[in-house]
Image (cartoon, grey):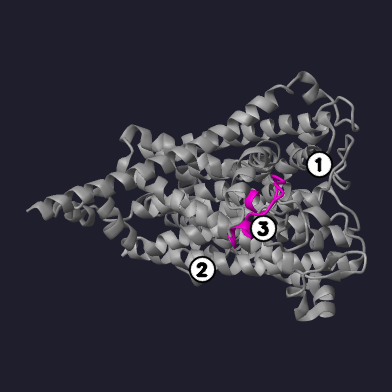
Amino acid sequence: MTAVSEAATSSALRTREATVRRFAVTDMVFRTATRLSAILVLVLLGGVAISLVAGSWEALSKFGFSFLTTESWNPVTENFGALAPIYGTIVTSAIAILIAVPIGIGIAIFLTELCPRPLRRPIGIAVELLAGIPSIIYGIWGLFVFAPFLQTTVQPFIISLFHGIPGLSSLFAGPPYGIGLLTSSLILAIMVLPFITSITKDVFDTVPAVLKESAYGIGCTTWEVTRRVTIPYTRIGIMGGVMLGLGRALGETMAVTFVIGNAHRISASLFAPGTTISATIANEFTEADGNLYTSSLVSLGLILFIITFIILALARYMLLRIDSRTGA
Amino acid sequence: MSTAASLHQSRKRKNAVMMTLCVVAAGIGLAWLALILGALLYKGLSGVSLSVFTEMTPPPGDAGGLLNAIYGSIVMTIIGIVVGTPIGVLAGTYMAEYGRFSKLTTVVRFINDILLSAPSIIIGLFVYELMVRPMGHFSAIAGAVALSILVIPVVVRTTEDMLNLVPNALREAGTAIGAPRWVVIRSVAYRAALSGIVTGILLAIARISGETAPLLFTALNNQFWSSNLNAPMASLPVTIFQFALSPYEEWQQLAWTGALIITLTVLGLSIIARSLTGRREDR
């Protein structure tokens, strides 16, 4: 009687042990799989960095530091310098940010302070949908609709307006091509606007209601509350959003490729065609013959990677700081 | 007294001016969206016909469709999603479940956020160096790999966020009845976070279906029908790029129509994704 039940217990114990062991093994396997996938994300970024350095080695070892300071880009004589694309990238992104930041913050204020509640969500979604539109759409729209419009109406007007004024007249010198640095900047501004808006709106929402209510309580107007309470409280978060937008603008390829004109030169006029790092790569990479040409284009990619990495890292750091504050 | 009153007036005026400017800013934002969509509909719709979906991309000056480009886009998007999603979900699972408090998670989250907004043309260069150069030729599979690299960070991010939203009491209940960790993750956490994870995948599809830059020098383009993954393959965005910059009117029209197809797809996916998470918030 006891012997039978002991045998049953021990066999039950054995199946139990086997099950537990099986559980442990499958759990180990699953755990390792998830861990490896997480590590793969790191490997990807490392791989990008290594492959770019390897690919640009030939050009960088030939041109050295002068690659960064040379304007000439001549595939025939195989003399390459990155100054014009770097200049174009920085100028277009800077102008885009200058335009997009005030508008983006304005929309965020509108959404958090002014907008009637039922409209808040639809308008917020509409602005975010702008972020989802692929950049090639902005490009084709910029080339066929926006650039001709600028060429026939806005640019001739601005050129004649500033004609003869020193400084401004060379900054806005003709002829009006339609495409060029300023057109690219405007398209970029439209493209980064949703990013800046949605992040600013999110950080505005982190302001404790008590702070705003006490400001209203001592008689502040909406603008004063925004200017003296909301914006100072969220300054780091807004900066993070702006940097994130800047990162987008610097690396944006297709929209710019359509409307920048792809000219490797630095001109004082914002109406002149120019080029950016990403537009140069997109336009010339498949046509590049010769290892030095290809390698020079990969070097441009490396420069872009380093610039955007720094900007995006700063952006994330700033946004992390505001996150940890609201978490505390 | 009168200075106080005038100060009050000027403060009110300033408030009115600034708030008007904010309304104008919102108006500008919405106007751009309307302008772009309006132009797309106007120019794109006039070229929509059955032949767009049944005929190949034409030689210059001829009529034709976008069939091979649409096919190529679908094939590469599917491969990109199939390759990228499991990796992204698993990585997100590690960050939210096994390694929620580990150092590795902090680092991966930071790097993943950078990958998320890294210029996609850089990914194209990476895959060119990784696959195209060693293989010696452009191929659809290289394009799909480039797309999958874009999918991973999107899916990682949403998976982690959504798993973090699952209440710990649910996991504890699972553990209390003796389920091992991975069963708890699979049958409790995944199930609770399912709609969020699906949203992430939809957003990833929306992102890669319009990507051009990473395909330019990986999958290249193809004027003809090709289902060979080891050969260059046409895709809708690259075809739009080529056709829009050409001087031929038929090609430009096809580019507009293709742009309309992509935009409607992307907007549709984003709206579906949003409505999935929207329901979550209401609950």
- Mark 2 chain: A
Image point (62%, 53%), residue name: A163
**For the residues tagged 1 and 3, is the chain the same?**
no
Which residue is label 3 attached to? A269
Say left or right for A251 vs B142: left
Image point (73%, 58%), residue name: A275
Identify whether A47 is placed above or below B78: below
Which residue is label 1 attached to? B242
Characterize the local packing of mark 3: few (<14), some (14-19) or many (20 or more) Cα atoms within 10 angstroms: many
Foreground mark, 1 or 3? 3
Residue B134, image x and y in percent?
Answer: 87, 62
Foreground mark, 2 or 3? 3
Residue A232, image x and y in percent?
Answer: 32, 62
Q: Label the magenta part by its dominant secondary structure.
A: loop
Image point (48%, 37%), residue name: B30
Which residue is label 2 attached to? A314
- Mark 3 chain: A
Going by the picture, which residue comes out furthest to the front?
Answer: A164
Label 1 and label 3: CA atoms lie apart by 28 Å
In this picture, which residue range is highlighted in magenta?
Answer: A166-183
Q: Which label sits on residue A267?
A: none
Q: Does A167 appear in magenta? A: yes
Q: Nearer the viewer, residue A272 or B127?
A: A272
Say left or right for A323 vs A92: left
Residue B29, image x and y in percent?
Answer: 48, 41
**For the residues tagged 2 and 3, is the chain the same?**
yes
